[in-house]
Image (cartoon, rainbow, N blue to C red):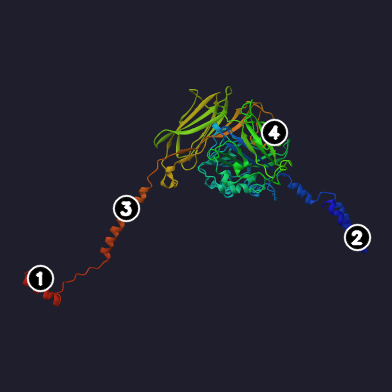
């Protein structure tokens, strides 16, 4: 109890002592002493309040004009909680979603990364994304060493997440789950890197729609009622070229000494708007054009709410972009090896909403952008299926290193379903016309109807080179019950995963993660000379030998017709009774007719 609250009660106790007798006075005096003793100190209510304030919410929106004239909008909502979820002693949830907190504690989850994506990020034309994900659904989880059965926990976790996000994650099983050894390392605190505690799965056929966005927004502390989340209008988000929403849970250091652990939840959403396909016909854009809404207020639970607009000049001489209204500040940072300049709008600043009740950020091009000014990313890749016929084929992957003088290694992860039988002896890696032997290779063969192929390689990419990786496969003939409802559409093969430390053009300095923007702190740089990049190639669509599913229908119809005709005839012969009737002589009319026919010379009836 606080001191101001104890003062009136103390005065009341003194008045009761003055009016009452000795017994009442003694009781009032004891009550007064208890109140004075409890007043100045922090009571249980204050301790609970301080415990509740251990969590914090940061939200930000990054608007990036792309070289092709499109616009990428990246939302990030970060909830940090200074609590130990693994001990299971947490009973009160304020900002952190209780559904996810109980899930982490019950199943022994150390890190969880879930992404639902519609479309494909075109790295060659859009540049490196802040956060990229493969088409469909991707889930990879690190479990605690104390988990007795990782496979059982993985299956239970996928089923629970399927219900939370209304996705088909319950279709994750042993046929599409792999255990990578080098591609996916923990992004948070990790005491060990035992890859047997890791599970990774991709569902490239998953379709993302509004029913997945709604539960994702409900996990936000303010929902979609205030703050940056008011822009998340489903009608506009899904009318875009690319849409990806993700959830990242990981343990982080509470302070610089890293003696205590905090838990971080990041909800990210990336969308790319194409104004040419939407009928706008102009590269000038604004928040209202993109989302059909503007920012009117902030989330009262957020400790930081900012909008970043990338106004970096394509060349150092002239600036191409002009933003309005004027930003509250300008931030410079080195992001993915390049020096970037951002116009910052702090929604918590009192001066931002003084002039108008809403914020509608507008960006105009000062002059048309030349296509020759499009920057080429240092690392990008593409993949396709070669060959002809329905018996054999070939998977080809092209990896580009456009750095003029630096070579660097890259880890390639290939996950191929079991019904494409790989011939590992046909694996070839060609760079500049010469064979390129991988420094590390890990291959786990598939088992029919039990597990997929897993291929991991560490490949050195020379400077300014193109590396071609090919491997041949044979198509299997499935059982007729294993085909999907639309077998002629084809079968999807998940995207390849590229992980690399790309050399930086500009030297990077160590920055405080809590003070830097959120889009720069998920993959922190280990040193100032390189930055981490994870890319995904296109998913593949492969045709398998497909039987004519109309033939069973024709056979059934013909068989039923023949059986009906034959069975009906035999049934009539076996069940009907036949009687022989002798012809009668007839009546008077017949006799008269025969007499007349006799005179006419006609045979009688």
Q: Nearer the viewer, mark 4 or mark 1?
A: 4
Q: Which residue is mark 1?
A: 604
Mark 1 and mark 2 in contact? Answer it, CB < 8 Å.
no
Asked if the residues shown at circle 3 and circle 1 are in contact, with their CB atoms under 8 angstroms apart, the answer is no
Badge nearest the viewer, 2 or 4: 4
Q: Secondary structure at mark 1?
A: loop
Looking at the image, is mark 2 or mark 3 earlier in the sequence?
A: 2
Q: Secondary structure at mark 2?
A: helix
Q: Is residue 105 shown left or right of residue 401?
A: right
Q: Crowding at label 3, few (<14), some or many (≥20) Cα neighbours within 10 Å? A: few
Q: Give the residue furthest to the bottom.
A: 588
Q: CA distance from mark 1 to mark 2?
A: 142 Å
Relative side of 484 to 236, left or right: left
Numbered label attached to residue 15? 2
Residue that appears at 64% across and 45% down? 229
Q: CA distance from mark 3 to mark 4?
A: 77 Å
């Amino acid at each position: 109890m606080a001191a101001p609250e104890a003062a009136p009660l103390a005065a009341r106790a003194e008045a009761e002592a003055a009016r009452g007798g000795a017994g009442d006075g003694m009781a009032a005096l004891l009550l007064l002493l208890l109140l004075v003793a409890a007043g100045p100190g922090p009571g249980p209510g204050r301790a609970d309040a301080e415990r509740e304030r251990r969590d914090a919410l940061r939200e930000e929106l990054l608007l990036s004009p792309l070289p092709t004239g499109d616009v990428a909008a990246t939302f990030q909502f970060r909830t940090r909680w200074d609590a130990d979820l693994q001990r299971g002693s947490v009973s009160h949830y304020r900002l952190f979603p209780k559904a996810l907190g109980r899930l982490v504690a019950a199943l022994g989850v150390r890190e969880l990364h879930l992404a639902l994506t519609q479309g494909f990020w075109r790295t060659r034309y859009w540049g490196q994304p802040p956060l990229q994900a493969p088409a469909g659904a991707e889930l990879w989880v690190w479990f605690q060493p104390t988990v007795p059965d990782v496979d059982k926990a993985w299956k239970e976790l996928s089923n629970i997440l399927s219900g939370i996000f209304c996705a088909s994650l319950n279709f994750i099983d042993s046929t599409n789950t792999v255990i990578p050894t080098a591609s996916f390392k923990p992004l948070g605190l990790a005491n060990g890197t035992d890859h047997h505690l890791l599970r990774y799965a991709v569902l490239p056929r998953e379709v993302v729609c509004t029913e997945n966005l709604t539960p994702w927004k409900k996990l936000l502390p303010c929902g979609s009622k205030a703050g940056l989340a008011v822009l998340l209008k489903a009608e506009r988000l899904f009318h875009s070229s690319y849409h990806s929403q993700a959830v990242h849970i990981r343990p982080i250091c509470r302070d610089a000494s890293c003696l205590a652990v905090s838990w971080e939840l990041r909800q990210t959403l990336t969308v790319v708007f194409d104004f040419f396909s939407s009928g706008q016909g102009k590269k000038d854009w604004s928040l209202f054009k993109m989302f059909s809404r503007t920012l009117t207020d902030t989330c009262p639970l957020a400790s930081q709410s900012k909008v970043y607009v990338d106004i970096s000049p394509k060349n150092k001489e002239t600036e191409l972009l002009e933003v309005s209204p004027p930003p509250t500040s300008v931030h410079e940072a080195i992001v993915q090896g390049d020096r970037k300049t951002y116009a910052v709008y702090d929604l918590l600043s009192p001066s931002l909403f003084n002039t108008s009740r809403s914020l509608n950020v507008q960006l105009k091009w000062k002059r048309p952008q030349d296509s020759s000014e499009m920057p080429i990313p240092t690392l990008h890749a593409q993949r396709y299926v070669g060959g002809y016929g329905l018996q054999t084929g070939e998977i080809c992957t092209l990896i580009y290193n456009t750095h003029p003088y630096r070579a660097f290694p890259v880890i390639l992860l290939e996950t191929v379903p079991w019904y494409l039988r790989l011939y590992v002896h046909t694996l070839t890696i060609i760079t500049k016309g010469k064979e390129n032997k991988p420094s590390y290779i890990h291959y786990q063969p598939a088992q029919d109807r039990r597990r997929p192929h897993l291929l991991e390689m560490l490949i050195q990419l020379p400077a300014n080179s193109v590396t071609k990786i090919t491997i041949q496969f044979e198509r299997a003939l499935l059982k007729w019950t294993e085909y999907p409802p639309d077998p002629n559409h084809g079968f999807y093969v998940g995207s390849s995963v590229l992980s690399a430390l790309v050399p930086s053009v500009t030297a990077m300095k160590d920055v405080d993660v809590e003070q830097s923007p959120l889009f720069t702190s998920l993959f922190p740089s280990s040193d100032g000379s390189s930055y981490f990049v994870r890319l995904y190639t296109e998913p593949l669509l492969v045709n398998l030998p497909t039987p004519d599913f109309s033939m069973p229908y024709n056979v059934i119809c013909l068989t039923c017709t023949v059986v009906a005709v034959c069975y009906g005839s035999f049934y009539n012969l076996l069940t009907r009774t036949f009687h022989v009737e002798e012809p009668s002589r007839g009546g008077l009319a017949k006799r008269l007719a025969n007499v007349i026919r006799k005179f006419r010379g006609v045979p009688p009836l």
